[in-house]
Amino acid sequence: MGDDNKANWIRSIRKEHKIHFICIQETQFSEISKFKLGYLWGKSNFEFEGMGASGRSGGLLSIWEPGIFQKSFVVAKKNFLLISGILLGFNVTMNVVNVYGPHSLNEKKELWAELEKLRHERDGVWVFVGDFNEVRYPSERLNSEFYPQGANLFNQFIFNAQLMEFNMSGHPFTFMRGLGSSYSKLDRFLVCNEFVNKWPYACARVLPRHLSDHCPIILTATNIDFGPPPPV
């Protein structure tokens, strides 16, 4: 995670936008301490699950407010972290999948197949969020090479898993390489039809980039908020 500045940044995002569920990718944490996470979340009560990093690479972390969401089931893998539970007040089973996509095409193909299988095995409302390390269309890259095979596999996963993407306001790209030599849209929200039917006025937004090469993105619906601060 790095330094206090990044923790303060994440905490300020959560406070300003009243976020109840946070997903972070590439934490670089080999071990996760609740004491350390207090700097990210703030003084209010929270629960968390994580997948440790391998050296200085990878790592996934999901943190939530237990008064809003009650955990019942977890699947933790290298490239995704599924937290299933009950969304209190709505009596809805919610499945939140924190995703950090691999770089190689073969690994992506394996991940999409595993996520699709998981999606169809469990009931409830589904939200997939994170850094998928893939784009869907040529327009989602600027000064960066577009690979049709990877995009086709990603789009096929979205179709087969019966998911849809929220259009995000704020900025067309979520990742910047270097000092702005190239841009890509790698971070996004994918949800099932049940989510859209239940929260038809939900909206997604790209926030300004600050201490990371990724922009934070947030999904806001009535009484629930999902916000992944960027990989760091």
Image (cartoon, helix red, strand yellow):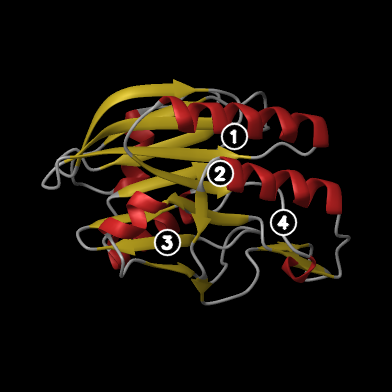
In x, y percent, where is residue 67?
14, 42
Q: Amino acid at mark 1?
A: Gln
Sequence-first tag of 1 and 4: 1
Location of residue 143 with respect to 125 vertically, above or below: below
Q: Residues within 10 Å of mark 4 (few under 14, many from 20)?
A: many
> Which numbered disc, 2 or 1, marks the residue that appears first in the sequence?
2
Residue 10 found in image quarter: bottom left
The residue that disc 1 covers is 28
Q: Which numbered disc, 4 or 2, marks the residue closer to the eye?
A: 4
Residue assigned mark 2? 2
> In this orientation, which residue lies closer to the viewer: 153 or 129?
153
Q: What is the number of the mark on residue 218?
A: 3
Mark closest to the chain's N terminus, 1 or 3: 1
| Real-space CA distance between mark 1 and mark 3, rounded to the nearest whole angstrom | 22 Å
Q: CA distance from mark 2 to mark 1?
A: 8 Å
- As measured in the structure, the alpha-carbon distance from the residue carrying label 4 to the one carrying label 2 is 27 Å
Residue depicted at x 70% and y 27%: 110
Q: In the displayed structure, does residue 115 sit left or right of residue 112? A: left
| SS type, badge 4 | loop
Earlier sequence position, callout 4 versus callout 2: 2
Q: Secondary structure at mark 3?
A: strand
- Density class for disc 1 (Cα within 10 Å; few <14, some 14-19, many ≥20) is many
Q: Which residue is mark 4?
A: 135
Callout 4, which amino acid?
Val
- At x 60%, y 26%, the residue is 114
- Per the model, the C-alpha gap separating discs 2 and 3 is 22 Å
Q: In the image, which is nearer the foreground, mark 2 or mark 3?
A: 3
